[in-house]
Amino acid sequence: MPFPILEAAAQGMVYKIGDLAREFDVTLRALRFYEDRGLVTPERSGTTRLYSAEDRERLRIALFCKRIGLSLGEIGEVLDLHEFDEAGGSMDKVRDVYSLQLQSLREKQKETEQTIADLETAIEGL
């Protein structure tokens, strides 16, 4: 009887590292980094990393969190909250983390817009 992981791989239920790297347009090194930090925990078949659908979803969330500027600690917190939500409901906390980050990004956007205006004024004055 084949190993469950290999059987699941044959049915398309798991993903290899290269598959996820291509899908999410990240490097293999980035995926190994997330694994080293415990954000994803793929199974191993020899030297091959096999990511489950849950690992894939955790990676999707982690990359979203990275894109919006959350720290590794905050990413881990969001991932933990997503897992906890399956057992008891914690999306309000995730919403709070995202809302705080949105507020921070809006403040940075205002600062950037002001800096651009100042730079345009400086260029016009030359």
Image (cartoon, helix red, strand yellow):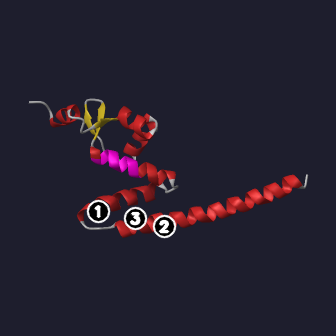
- As drawn, which residue projects farthest toward the right? 126
Placement of 47 over or under 125, stated as above or below: above
- Amino acid type assigned to the residue bearing label 3 in the image: Val
**Residue 38 within the segment the image draws in magenta:** no
Image quarter hosting the N terminus = top left
- How far apart in space, not on screen, are marks 2 and 3 (Cα)? 8 Å
Q: Earlier in the sequence, mark 1 or mark 3?
A: 1
> What residue lies at 31% left-to-right and 46% top-to-bottom?
55
Q: Secondary structure beneath disc 3?
A: helix
Q: Nearest the camera: 20 or 47? A: 20
Residue under label 3: 94
Q: Position of residue 80 (x, y in %)?
A: 34, 59
Lower sequence index among marks 2 and 1:
1
Report if residue 49 is visible in the image.
Answer: yes
Q: Could you tell me which secondary element the residue under label 2 belongs to?
A: helix
Q: CA distance from mark 2 to mark 1?
A: 19 Å
Q: Quadrant of residue 118?
A: bottom right
Report which quarter residue 21 is drawn in.
top left
How many angstroms separate mark 1 from mark 3 (CA)? 11 Å
Where disc 1 sits, the SS reads: helix
Task: Report the residue marked by disc 1.
Answer: 84
Q: Which residue is mark 2?
A: 99
Say if residue 39 shows up in the picture: no
N-term-proximal mark, 2 vs 3: 3
Give, as a three-letter code, the residue at label 1. Phe
How packed mark 1 is, by other alpha carbons closer than 10 Å (few <14, some 14-19, many 20 or more), is: few
Q: Residue at x 36, y 34 (%)?
A: 19
* Magenta span of residues: 54-61
